[in-house]
Image (cartoon, rainbow, N blue to C red):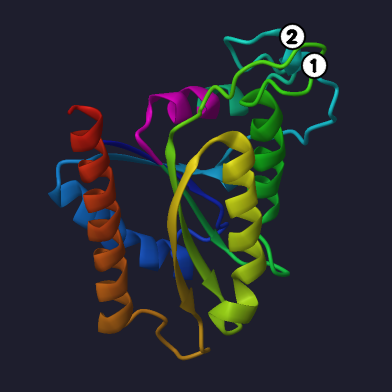
Amino acid sequence: MEVCILMGSPKKKGNTAAILKPFIEELEDYNANVEVIWLYDCKIEPCTACKTCQKKFSEFGCYHEDDVQKIFKKILMCDLLVFATPIYSWYCTSPMKSLLDRLVYGMNKYYGDEKGPALWAGKSLALITTCGYKPEKGADIWENGIKRYCKHSQLKYIGMLVERDLGKPSFMDREKEEHSRQFAKQIYNILDNSTKVDNC
């Protein structure tokens, strides 16, 4: 299983990175090949809705020459796409939002003179999120936005792991680690069962 994690946190040792670590370890125990792309390390230009990408149905087609072209190829090769981000003002961080805008155009060829395909249709997507408020108030808008994003893009939304930062000296504890590992197991089982059904 190929897993592409788009990491939207600016902090290599922050809360989101901490909750992501056992998740990755658990997936690797199932022989998954996991790649983490740190978005703050990438050059991601904002989308200008120029629709250049809509002229090419078989490739990304964006006129920007930045790191999104490489990210696009990584996404096409993966079985599972994970958006990992802390919540900033009820949504994802700025480089992830810029990437989402670029991908919704470059991946979905819906906006030109002729309607084309969604190049990533059928891929599974999960969320890993940390926030300061209670999850039902801190991460609900983000999750609902991504559910709509997935429906529009023909992606399979398979769930979110969200953990709250209560401001204690140490964010991580055994309970959060177990939640992370269980989420990885849940996702693996969903994808494994889906593969078995597809092969029948």
Q: Quadrant of the C terminus?
A: top left
Q: Residue at x 20, y 57 (%)?
A: 26
Q: Residue at x 57, y 9 (%)?
A: 58
For label 2, the SS is helix
Viewer-closest of 40 and 56: 56
Q: Residue at x 50, y 65 (%)?
A: 129
Q: Earlier in the sequence, mark 2 or mark 1?
A: 2
The vertical placement of 194 against 175, above or below, is above
Residues under numbered marks 2 and 1 in contact, where contact means CB atoms less than 8 Å apart: yes
Q: Amino acid at mark 1?
A: Gly
* CA gap, disc 2 and disc 1: 7 Å
Which region shows up in magenta? Answer: 71-80
Total numbered circles: 2
> Does residue 73 belong to the magenta stretch?
yes
The vertical placement of 29 against 141, above or below, is above
Q: Quadrant of the N terminus?
A: top left
Q: Which residue is mark 2?
A: 55
Q: Disc number at residue 112?
A: 1
For label 1, the SS is loop
x, y percent for residue 33: 25, 37
x, y percent for residue 17: 42, 62
The vertical placement of 11 against 168, above or below, is above
Viewer-closest of 151 and 2: 151
Res. 92 visible in picture: no
